[in-house]
Amino acid sequence: MAGYVVCIGKNAIDEYYKMDSYPALGDKVLLEYTGAIPGGFMANAATVAGALGADCYMMDVLGDDIYTDVLMDTMKSHNVKTDLIEFVKDTPNIKTMILMVGDEKTVLLFKGKHKIPTIDDRSLGLLRGAGFVYSNIADLSKFDNYKNLIEDFTSHGADLFIDAETSTFRDRVSEEFFFQKARIISLNEFAVEKYCGDKGEAAFFELMGDDPRKIIVETLGSKGCRILTKDRTVDLPAFRIEPVDTTGAGDTFNGALVYGLLQGWDIEEAGRFASAAAARSVLYKGARAGAVPAEE
């Protein structure tokens, strides 16, 4: 399968802080700043896919601060096409605080009011011609007439790939339109619980119905991953490693999965490759540690 992927979402700066323990409500805690690294769910996956060798575009609106050039240079260095990036003056870029206690982390996401990317003839044409449009529900729902937009590019043959992080959707009923329109949905174990509720995996098979192309991917951390289709269930064990930083592991998995599917691999081969990419990425610090060539 030839083609390219358009990633829609936000770049961010991940600021890392170390502390000895989590504070109780009302307590104070001493933080040690340990550095800042480019991040952002969709942008992480884009840099991974681009570095692996996929033809990848990023659609985003960046602010204007000391991190803007760093964010742009990082995308370009990982072969991400930045033609669809826009800029807003006198606006800070989105920031994330990652609080580390030993190997465990808590991620604080700052709310932003950035401009929504412009949909013009060129960007719409790229969306229509994509092999995959990769995004999440929170970012897609900000577009005016988002339902018409998604109906448009999927009707022209682009497959929607949704990263369903728990913070990006309300519940399966409220967001039914997105889940129905997506060909591929990736959920971690917390998002699986949020989506399925008391129904368990029956909720996924209900969603798939008789659609032979729909793919649901459960990324389960140290328990590996589970891939569901109408006719097939694939369980892949996790690679045994000692993690250094698990930030961005899910984004690495999804970016590598897109790469594999664009190569024409079947879902099991693409899933095993994505699992390996995610396992390798957590041996290093940073949400984009998985952005390396496919050979590596």
Image: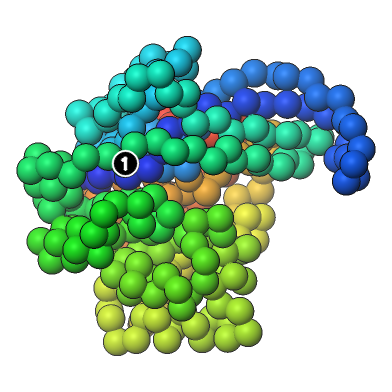
Residue placed under numbered mark 1 in the picture: 116
Q: Between 118 and 1, which is closer to the camera in this rendering? A: 118
The amino acid marked with disc number 1 is Ile
Q: Between 48 and 74, which is closer to the camera in this rendering? A: 74
**Residue 106 in view in this figure:** yes
**Residue 264 in view in this figure:** no
The residue depicted at 65 percent of the width and 32 percent of the height is 97
Q: Secondary structure at mark 1?
A: loop
Q: Is residue 262 left or right of residue 69?
A: left
Give the percent coordinates (x, y) of residue 22.
Answer: 86, 40
Give the percent coordinates (x, y) of residue 273.
Answer: 43, 49
Q: Between 264 and 136, which is closer to the camera in this rendering? A: 136
For the N terminus, which image quadrant?
bottom left
Give the percent coordinates (x, y) of residue 186.
Answer: 45, 61
Check the image and report above or below for 99 versus 211. Answer: above
The residue depicted at 46 percent of the width and 65 percent of the height is 217
Give the percent coordinates (x, y) of residue 226.
Answer: 52, 67
